[in-house]
Amino acid sequence: MREIQFREALREAMNEEMRRDPSVFLMGEEVAEYNGAYKVSQGMLDEFGPDRVLDTPISELGFAGLGVGAAMNGLRPIIEFMTFNFSLVAIDQVINSAAKMMSMSGGQFNIPMVFRGPTGNAGMLSSQHSQNFESWYANTPGLKVVVPSNPADAKGLLKTAIRDDDPVIFMESELMYGDKGEVPEEEYLIPIGQGKIVRMGQDITIVSFGKILKVAQQAADELSKEGIEAEVIDLRSVRPIDYEIIINSVKKTNRLLIVEEAWPLSAISSEITYHVQKYAFDYLDAPIQRINSKDVPLPYAPTLIEAILPNVKRTIEAANAVMYK
């Protein structure tokens, strides 16, 4: 099977859906003439023209609102935020318009649109450009929130998101755009809300998503050398969450560790912890552990970034704690 980059997988998904459905269009800062800030939309202006690949001013609130209006009138916008840090400028349109319109209109208006772009730390970008908003958006009824970890999932999930009749938040990572992975050439879709076991094990369940899944997988490899076989689950989406795959794994391993980049308060890991203690408490042989970023704004210095973000060392230590080692 061929290997392509994460950015290429996203581009293929958008190209295929725009060829299939003339109501799909892409809009955002630098997506057209510059081929995208991260070259995700490279060549799309040449194929689809300026009516379907639209450069915007630096006005996230404005073009997010334009997208909502377009979706209300039968189009399927893909709105690219250069980073989800900038989506805070547009959050009124995302939450108070896109997420609520179907409910407020009594079902008269679906909002079939995708908001996509990178989230989280991407190196030395400091506090205002390094935040994770998965749990913010997952807190909102009416939205679906997807956070893929690899090129194949990125393509299949983005195609599904574009076809969805509800607004979808699609979160990527600047640090993953160059990642390569096997991606099928034939058309395929991945359902939103369906997690995946990416490593089988029987001693402990490790749950993660997005780029931090790499940390979980690397930690699982190291734990295996110590004789601990971890089962690693990639959530792929955080609204809806595939609770069933987590519960079934915990019933087998009897231990749970959640690894997540976001801050600890009101995180996705908090929700999973609550759900597992409610529905699988009798199966737990140890308290649930979770690894999050430290509860501070992310600094600029690489040494401090390393100290604050989830990493393999912290994950292994937490896993050993769950195993009482």
Image (spheres, grey):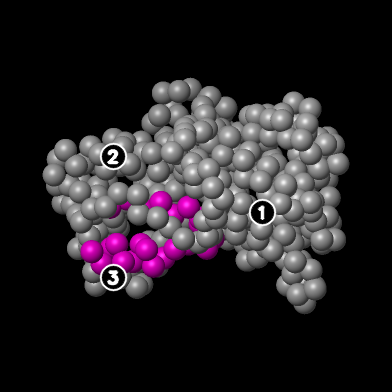
Q: Secondary structure at mark 1?
A: helix
- In magenta stretch: residue 162: no
Instruction: Find residue 88 and report its image quarter.
Output: top right
- In magenta stretch: residue 251: yes
Residue under the image location 64 percent in, 34 percent down? 40
Q: Is residue 73 above or below residue 280?
A: above
Q: Which residue is mark 3?
A: 281
Measured in 3D between alpha carbons, the distance from the residue under mark 2 to the one under mark 1, in whole angstroms, is 34 Å
Residue 119 visible somewhere in the drawing: no
Give the image location of residue 15, x and y in percent. Answer: 68, 42
Of the two numbered discs 2 and 1 in the rendering, the one whose residue sits closer to the viewer: 1
Residues shaded magenta: 231-252
Q: Assess disc 2: are there few (<14), some (14-19) or many (≥20) residues with their C-alpha within 10 Å of its C-alpha.
A: many
Toward the viewer: 282 or 182?
Answer: 182
Toward the viewer: 77 or 257?
Answer: 77
Q: Amino acid at mark 1?
A: Ile
Residue under the image location 30 percent in, 49 percent down? 199
